[in-house]
Amino acid sequence: MAINLQKGQRENLNAQKFTIGLGWDTNASSTGAAFDLDASVFMLGANSKLVADEYFVFYNNAKSPDGAVTHTGDNLTGDGDGDDESILVDLSKINSAVQEICVVVTIHDAADRKQNFGQVRNSFIRVVDENNNVLVKYELDEDFSVETAIEFGRIYKKDSQWKFEAVGAGMKGGLEDYLKKYN
């Protein structure tokens, strides 16, 4: 049975292999441009920085060097039900230096398209095990009217146990702000 989390809530992950699914819908927009949301993963060490540049996983770098994290592809529209983008995780392969996996969603060309997360609805992150059981789910219910990037959640290691935290923190600068923060 899925555990629906609130912002800031944490839960143990009792699976070595799982899929991180992200979903969203866009409001009817007067910007005249399609929405393209992109999921990214930052694999961080104990210092809360990228272990190496190659541990930034996104549509142009779809697999981490250790093979633990794989981005399954870029959804350019968000149309349809269910997960819009998915990230496969196998903790049995993870580089021992990685202590945290941050999951960020950004709006591609948000400034040029005059788009923000206030125009996005039904946003969620969920973790699904190999048997398609939803372990945890976090529905983003805040109105992010100026933010163009949101850290949906993070998976972190504490006392040899991997946990999931529902974060729901936004930034105005887009992906560049997260690259500065974690690099």
Image (cartoon, rainbow, N blue to C red):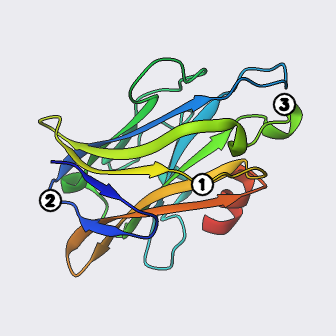
Q: Which mark is residue 163?
A: none
- Position of 46 with respect to 59 (left or right) is left
Decide: few, some or many residues near mark 2? Use Cα within 10 Å; few <14, some 14-19, many ≥20.
few
As drawn, 30 above or below 18 = above
Amino acid type, label 3: Arg
* Chain-order first, disc 2 or disc 1: 2
Question: In the figure, residue 32 lies in which quadrant?
Answer: top right
Mark 2: which amino acid?
Asn
Q: Is 136 rendered above or below residue 11?
A: above
Q: Earlier along the polypeptide chain: callout 1 or callout 3?
A: 3
Q: How many numbered marks, from 0 up?
A: 3
Q: Tell me residue 114's x, y (percent).
A: 86, 35
Q: Residues within 10 Å of mark 1 (few under 14, many from 20)?
A: few
Q: Which mark's residue is nearer the viewer, 1 or 3?
A: 1
Q: Find disc 3 in the rendering and name its residue.
A: 113
Which secondary structure, mark 1? loop
Q: Secondary structure at mark 3?
A: helix
Amino acid found under the numbered disc labelled 1: Glu
Which numbered tag is attached to residue 14?
2
The residue sitting at 58% across, 37% down in the picture is 121
Residue 25: x and y in percent read 56, 29
In the figure, is residue 162 to the left or right of 22?
left
Q: Is residue 102 visible?
A: no
The residue positioned 42% from the left and 22% from the top of the image is 81
Residue 30 position within the rendered picture, expressed as x and y whole percent measured from the top left? 84, 24
Residue nearer the viewer, 148 or 18 = 148
